[in-house]
Image: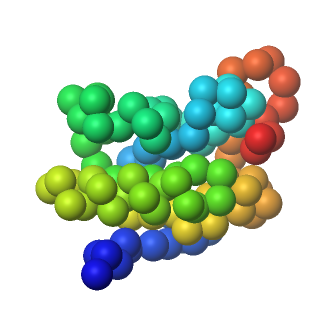
Amino acid sequence: MPQQVPTVYASEVPDDAVVLDVREDDEWVHGHIEGATHIPMGDVPARLDDMPEGDPLYLICRSGGRSARVAAWLNANGFDAVNVGDGMGAWQASGRPMVSETGQPPFVR
């Protein structure tokens, strides 16, 4: 039976949370949480040395599916990971701050 992944909503993520964004590069550049670490989902197993120090580490993607899978994998490998269950879509909808890499206003793609 799969392990239950601890989950919070975007509105519940602390302002000082350590966030890992597991979306793809094209999603990240259009809008992300300032200060978040970006490691696409498929790169996580090979980049464990790049994981930010967080206890817990908050994982986010667009809607919560990919981040839930990565959080479960990280928890099984000794990390303390929490999934942001409603993702960047809810982060943006709740008016939480975002930045982009494009010079344009940030948005969730």
- Name the residue: 60% across, 27% down: 25
Residue closest to the far right = 104
Does residue 9 appear anywhere in the picture?
Answer: yes
The colour scheme used to paint the residues is rainbow
Q: Is residue 103 left or right of residue 36?
A: right
Residue closest to the far top = 103
Q: Looking at the picture, tell me which residue is in the foreground, 79 or 16.
A: 79
Where residue 84 appears, x then y in whole percent? 52, 63
Where residue 27 appears, x then y in whole percent? 68, 34
- Name the residue: 38% across, 64% down: 82
Q: How many marks?
A: 0
Residue 51 vs 17, above or below: the answer is: above
Q: Is residue 34 left or right of residue 98?
A: left
Where residue 66 appears, x then y in whole percent? 52, 54
Does residue 17 appear anywhere in the picture?
Answer: no
Residue 96 vs 101, above or below: the answer is: below
The C terminus - image quarter = top right
Residue 70 vs 109, above or below: the answer is: below
Q: Looking at the picture, tell me which residue is in the foreground, 27 or 73.
A: 73
Q: Looking at the picture, tell me which residue is in the foreground, 52 or 68.
A: 68
Where residue 26 appears, x then y in whole percent? 68, 27
- Name the residue: 28% across, 81% down: 1
Residue 62 vs 27, above or below: the answer is: below
Residue closest to the far front = 1
Q: Quadrant of residue 23?
A: top right
- Name the residue: 27% across, 53% down: 74
